Amino acid sequence: MKIVIIGGTGLIGSKTVERLRSKGHEVLAASPNSGVDTITGKGLAEALAGAEVVLDLANSPSFEDKAVLEFFQTSGRNLLKAAAAAGVKHHIALSIVGMERLQGSGYMRAKMAQEQLIKASGIPYTIVHSTQFHEFMAGIAQSGTSGQMVHLSPAYVQPIASDDVADVMAEVALGAPVNGTIEIGGPEKIRLTDIVTRLLKATNDPRQVITDPHARYFGVELEDNSLVTGAKARLGRIRFDDWLSRQPQQKKSA
């Protein structure tokens, strides 16, 4: 079976490609670097020819409100048009747990727009809502940093390892469309302030975490459970501390 992964060279994409190829499938890792551009449409028809499944893992290079909305709308329309022309039988997209609760964020509004295009396309689909990845916790810490202080919301997070996400994406690619949404998250629910404190301690980072209920996440304030899954979610197996213990650590430069 031919499977096309848009964003197939990224964190989740590359791991999903590996899993599907190991099962004997023909997998095309599509990206602008490989000549497939969902914004201009260049290379899309050729890439999707003969494909049964498409996974959309592309992300916007800009998080500015107008730019990110234009990215997901343009990319989504071009990809869905090409998928329909190619006779794709299953369109899969990776999105965000809690996205619908965080519509004050331009990024979350853009993801909502992407999902609406998919649902209206007429192509059988599955949307996977994931919690934040272990690998992006350092970036979240950086976004809240001012000097030696890291201002973060005390809201709960439920981070998931990229390996667990890739396992699910590969499984969904080989399964039937649900024409709806499934949720995935990590195996533990932790306050954002606590998990970043663990990260900084493990990496000998001298910054201090400050609990700030008004600290913003993708431009919006969080409630306690804005970023955690519902009761029916599928949970990953890799805990944050276990993942962290396997990372090559380098002492932060002063």
Image (cartoon, rainbow, N blue to C red):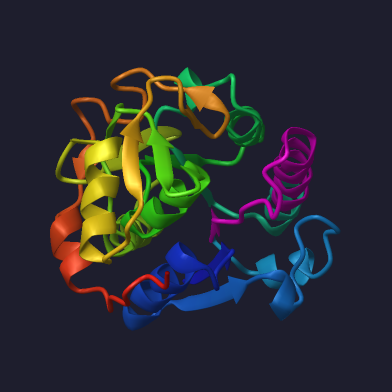
Magenta region includes residue 28: no
| Above-or-below relation of 155 to 39 | above
Q: What residue do we see at 26% from left, 56% from top?
A: 199
Residue 103 as seen in the image, left or right of residue 179:
right
Q: Position of residue 66 (x, y in %)?
A: 79, 34
Q: Quadrant of residue 212?
A: top left
The quadrant in which the C terminus is found is bottom left
* Residue 65 part of the magenta-drawn span: yes
Q: Residue at x 46, y 19 (%)?
A: 101
Which span is picked out in magenta? 53-79
Q: Nearer the viewer, residue 51 or 188?
A: 188
Viewed as shown, does residue 144 lie left or right of 211?
Answer: right
Query: Residue 248, image x and y in percent?
Result: 28, 79
Residue 123 x %, y %: 60, 41
Task: Give the answer, above or below, for where 40 lies relative to 106.
Answer: below
Q: Confirm whether residue 65 shows in the render.
A: yes
Rendered location of residue 154, percent (x, y): 30, 28
Left or right: residue 179 versus residue 191 is right
Taking depth in this image into account, of 99 and 49 the one nearest to the observer is: 99
Q: Which image quarter: residue 36?
A: bottom right
